[in-house]
Image (tube, rainbow, N blue to C red):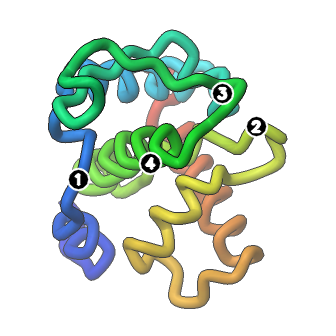
Amino acid sequence: MPNDAVAKKMMSIVWTYADKDAAALAEVKNRIGIAAKKEVLLRSSEFVKGLTFKLPQVFNSEPYYIKIWNWSERDKNILGDFLGHVSMDSYLEHGFMLSALVIDDKGDGPGEMFSDMIKMSGAVTDPSEDNIRAFWAEQVKKVFAHYKGR
């Protein structure tokens, strides 16, 4: 487990959603893990299709699906929270951020949610677009290297 400033910041995050739905968190990890084995990136709208969330603070744990044609701020916050938690877990266990594989819908780089996680964790000292893109590319390489042949 990394014992650095990034790890400490990630462990101090209070998760609003991800720690309240173990089944959805496991499914998020599973979907990204499958993509990692295939060495593919996932557009966020494709990634979240059919993903069921059962959160106490959203419709009293009734099944909730993100409407991919009309993302609300709550939808972005829910997915971002789950992706952030997955990144924390993989960073603490393996030293990389697994959710780097979930990219924006344009498919040309890190998703907004991943960029936010990088900024929150302090993973880059200068969070310019170029530095975030470079860090993201490094994380993608680390993920693919870890999953190669698995």
Specify the amino acid type for callout 4: Asn
The residue lying toward the viewer, choosing from 2 and 130, is 130
| Number of numbered discs overlaid on the protein picture | 4
**Residue corresponding to mark 4:** 77
Whole-number angstrom distance, CA of label 2 to CA of label 1: 24 Å
Mark 4, other Cα within 10 Å: few <14 / some 14–19 / many ≥20: some
**Residue corresponding to mark 3:** 45
Whole-number angstrom distance, CA of label 4 to CA of label 2: 16 Å
- Asked if the residue under mark 3 is in contact with the one under mark 2, i.e. CB atoms within 8 Å, the reply is yes
User: Considering the image in quadrants, where does the N terminus appear?
Assistant: bottom left
Left or right, residue 141 beside residue 29: right
User: Considering the image in quadrants, where does the C terminus appear?
Assistant: top left
Q: Which mark is residue 105?
A: 2
Quarter occupied by residue 64 = top left
Q: Which comes before the other along the chain, label 2 or label 1?
A: 1
Q: Element type at marker 3?
A: helix
Quarter occupied by residue 107 = top right
Q: Which comes before the other along the chain, label 2 or label 3?
A: 3
**Residue corresponding to mark 1:** 15
Q: Which comes before the other along the chain, label 4 or label 1?
A: 1
Please tell me which residue is depicted at 60% across the width and 89% down the height of the picture: 126
Above or below 63: residue 83: below
Whole-number angstrom distance, CA of label 4 to CA of label 1: 10 Å
